[in-house]
Image (cartoon, rainbow, N blue to C red):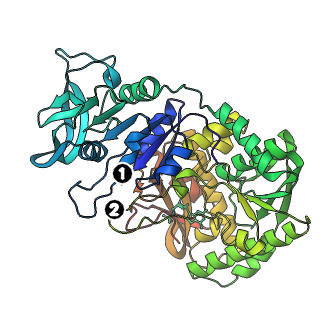
Amino acid sequence: MSVHSEKIIILDFGSQTTQLIARRIREQKVYSEIHPYDIELDRLQEMNPSGIVMSGGPASVYDDDAPISDPGLFELGIPVLGICYGAQLMMQQLGGRVEKTDHREFGKAELQISYTGGIFAGTETEPAKYQVWMSHGDRVEQAAPGFVATASSTHSPFAALRHENKPFVAVQFHPEVVHTLIGNDILRNFIFDLCDCHPEWTMHSFIDSTVAEIREKVGDEKVICALSGGVDSSVTAALVHRAIGDQLTCIYVNNGLMRTGESESVLRFFRQKTNLHVIDIDATKDFLEELKAIVDPEEKRKRIGFGFIKIFEEEAGKLGEVKYLAQGTLYPDVIESVVFHGKAPIKSHHNVGGLPERMQLDLIEPLRELFKDEVRELGLELGLPEEAIYRQPFPGPGLGIRIMGEVTAERLHILRQADVIVLEEMKNSGWYRKVWQSFAVLLPIQTVGVMGDGRTYENVVAIRSVDSRDAMTADWSKLPYDILGRISNRIINEVRGVNRVVYDISSKPPSTIEWE
Ligand code: XMP
């Protein structure tokens, strides 16, 4: 059950920008949620939305398997905004006509507004033309009864429409993308004027409502949380702790594959600045033992994952009866994304794979409504230090998958020193927060070099730095040469056992971000 009193529901028809609509609305401090287009009317009504947005999508309303929402949603007395495909479907369902056009519009277009009220409040008709972003093949040829055009573009006589006495509006273009320069104004007008929402959804109010929700759900049961040092688990722990205090126990497993100082600062913070109970297990030896002579990446991952679960289970077992596991699942992991052809897959995400089932734990996922940037904002509001909040992602198997070949204490020592240098230089130059991830990788080969008058035969370190939005795709960062030069110089001079540094210039796909 959702505790947000005012919310906008977005029906997803498969557009790549559906998530953006939710973000833009949330930026206005109004809560918004994405649901599949074919959600049942009863459920929609139960959620009591202040407004509904029908998203865009790749289909044509004339396709045999076009995604169609229940037209009964227009009978609920709730304001509706249709965007692109959503606009066309709205017109078709309410009695208008949509047709394929020879003049497909993709990209920037100029909008001539003819009605400056409603979603266009604050705009002008003459002589203004507003830049908007179009992406459609079909177009509205005839407005549904009761609707009138409120804007046009060169190829769309009905680039925007409104109903004359019902709160229904439709736009052929995408207000959620930055190229639609008045996009935010349009969304604001929709949510504040047509839907009568108030800008009250802040991280502060989120904390209040979530804390109350967690308290009610947990009662006096015990909760455990695997603290990894990453942003999501740190924020989860801080939030759950605020709700139930000592009923929460966090378990931090040091698998010996962490970066220098990667998690110490978070542990220090939780121990010194909060009363959070953290069990800190140093399992370095066990993990290194398990990884002995293992070179296959999948086998490494399996052993590291299994080792983690084993220790976590043992420690949790000592706490007596535990009912809940708190974990930092984020919104992009739970959205039921609509795939146009075929059934919608539901992504399920487990930070601690398999544990809930094995230990019969129920989940508490207080971040499951939030995007990453909102989690960061929440963390700051909860008082977590910036260095923990803006930490780059770090994989669960840690440095184990950044050492090609066998993981040994000696090779870990070499990689840690190189890694610190990469981080220091990225931070000092202001690039650390500009990239998605930046790190060093230790290769399983040795090359010849010359130091002083002597020949060397030593290790190669690769530097990987990528730009990405969500880690699904990534490109190598175009770091300035002087930063790369400094990193290379420092590693070769300061890290004993390394005589060569190379920069990885592959994108994902076809490469991945991590090397293993
Ligand atoms: P790849 O290498 O698949 O990585 O392009 C995508 C993102 O996921 C991170 N990653 C992991 N994170 N457990 C994690 O929590 C893992 O086993 C794992 N493997 C990769 C990686 O750092 C990148 O951000």
Q: 501 or 420: which is nearer to us?
A: 420
- For badge 2, the amino acid type reads Phe
Callout 1 secondary element: loop
Residue 452 appears in the picture as rendered: no
Res 200 label: none
Using the image as rendered, state which of residue 169 and residue 286 is in the foreground. Answer: 169
Label 2, label 1: how far apart the Cα atoms are: 11 Å
In the displayed orientation, state which residue is furthest to the left.
102
Q: Tell me which numbered mark, 2 or 1, is placed earlier along the sequence.
A: 1
Residue 251 showing in the rendered view: yes
Would residue 279 be found to the left or right of residue 43 on screen?
A: right
Write the residue at 64% across / 68% down: 397
Q: Name the foreground residue: 151 vs 52.
A: 52
For badge 1, the amino acid type reads: Gln
- Image quarter for ligand 1: bottom right
Residue depicted at 21% across the width and 28% down the height: 148
Query: Mark 2, residues whose alpha carbon is within 10 Å: few (<14), some, or many (≥20)?
Result: some
Frontmost residue, 479 versus 350: 350
The residue that label 2 is drawn on is 340
Q: Secondary structure at mark 2?
A: loop
Q: Residue at x 85, y 72 (%)?
A: 314
Q: Is residue 476 left or right of residue 283?
A: left
The residue positioned 31% from the left and 45% from the top of the image is: 86
Which numbered tag is attached to residue 16?
1
Q: Quadrant of residue 200?
A: top right
Is 90 drawn above or below residue 288 in the view shown? above
Report which quarter residue 396 is drawn in: bottom right
In the rendered image, residue 120, in percent from the top left (x then y), is placed at: 31, 23
Relative side of 445 to 329, left or right: left
Residue 299 screen position, x and y as percent: 61, 82
Residue 244 percent coordinates (x, y): 84, 46
